[in-house]
Image (tube, rainbow, N blue to C red):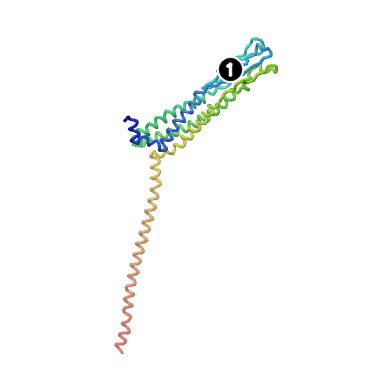
Amino acid sequence: MDPVSQLASAGTFRVLKEPLAFLRALELLFAIFAFATCGGYSGGLRLSVDCVNKTESNLSIDIAFAYPFRLHQVTFEVPTCEGKERQKLALIGDSSSSAEFFVTVAVFAFLYSLAATVVYIFFQNKYRENNRGPLIDFIVTVVFSFLWLVGSSAWAKGLSDVKVATDPKEVLLLMSACKQPSNKCMAVHSPVMSSLNTSVVFGFLNFILWAGNIWFVFKETGWHSSGQRYLSDPMEKHSSSYNQGGYNQDSYGSSSGYSQQASLGPSSDEFGQQPTGPTSFTNQI
């Protein structure tokens, strides 16, 4: 039997059914989707400029752009419709900082999730031997939750800037030939942004997963157990004091009953001595 089958038969992978390891596995997959949909993007648009003089027209102006979206470095040439002269233009904007930060967070989150999943499956006993492993895991989970929130928000703003900068209507406004009513300028093909929209969605889903996993990681730390111990101590003290109070009442009740019996004793003796009076009177008679 191969090692993987032995581990599976021994129940090693049952830990994946627990919330902590299961969420780590989901984080690993979602991180892959996040940086793949953003870092692997390449798109473009196509414009056409139809001049009055047809020989000066260009009906297929292709403008390509890709990750990391340094749009100001994307240049293209368009006709001016004034002879053979051509105009060199560039797109507006630079969203590389937000895009690269988002992909960097996704890559490091993938690496950490992979390492943590391996530790959960194969080294779970060592992970729980002391409090150091869960504490490190807790701190890293909180940090990555914050990074996912910041990175996803920044990339969402960067993506909106990319959409505006690559809008064919905005690009046509940059061309001098399109400012003349006699020339016809139009968009042939617009960029497809579906994968970039998906990357933003996966970014916020990763934030939800990491933020939700904070509680399950916290339960593995010593802080959670010490907090439960701190809460249970006052309850134990309260219950013990209540029991002591009940014991004192019982002892008090028994002692009072005893004293009552003791006090009744003499009265009963006195009552027993009362018939001696009439008896002696009869004897006298």
Name the residue that disc number 1 marks: 62
Q: Position of residue 173 (x, y in %)?
A: 64, 20
Q: Locate the N terminus and report the quarter of the image it occupies.
A: top left
Q: Nearer the viewer, residue 130 or 191?
A: 191
Residue projecting furthest to the front: 1
Taking the spot 34% from the left edge, 72% from the top edge, the residue there is 264
In this rendering, would 148 be left or right of 18?
right
Q: Quadrant of residue 280?
A: bottom left
Q: Position of residue 200 (x, y in %)?
A: 52, 29
Q: Quadrant of residue 251?
A: bottom left
Taking the spot 61% from the left edge, 19% from the top edge, the residue there is 47
Q: Position of residue 89 (x, y in %)?
A: 60, 16
Under circle 1, the secondary element is: strand
Decide: is 277 above or below 110. below
Q: Quadrant of residue 63?
A: top right
Taking the spot 60% from the left edge, 23% from the top edge, the residue there is 167
Query: Counting other residues with Cα less than 10 Å from the Cα at mark 1, is it few (<14), some (14-19), or many (20 or more)?
Result: some
Decide: is 85 above or below 72. above
Q: Locate the C terminus and report the quarter of the image it occupies.
A: bottom left
Residue projecting furthest to the right: 182
In this rendering, would 125 be left or right of 207?
left
Residue projecting furthest to the top: 84
Residue projecting furthest to the bottom: 285
Q: Nearer the viewer, residue 253 or 199?
A: 199
Q: Nearer the viewer, residue 264 or 97?
A: 97
Q: Position of residue 247 (x, y in %)?
A: 35, 59
Residue kind at label 1, given as amino acid type: Asp
Q: Nearer the viewer, residue 230 or 182?
A: 182
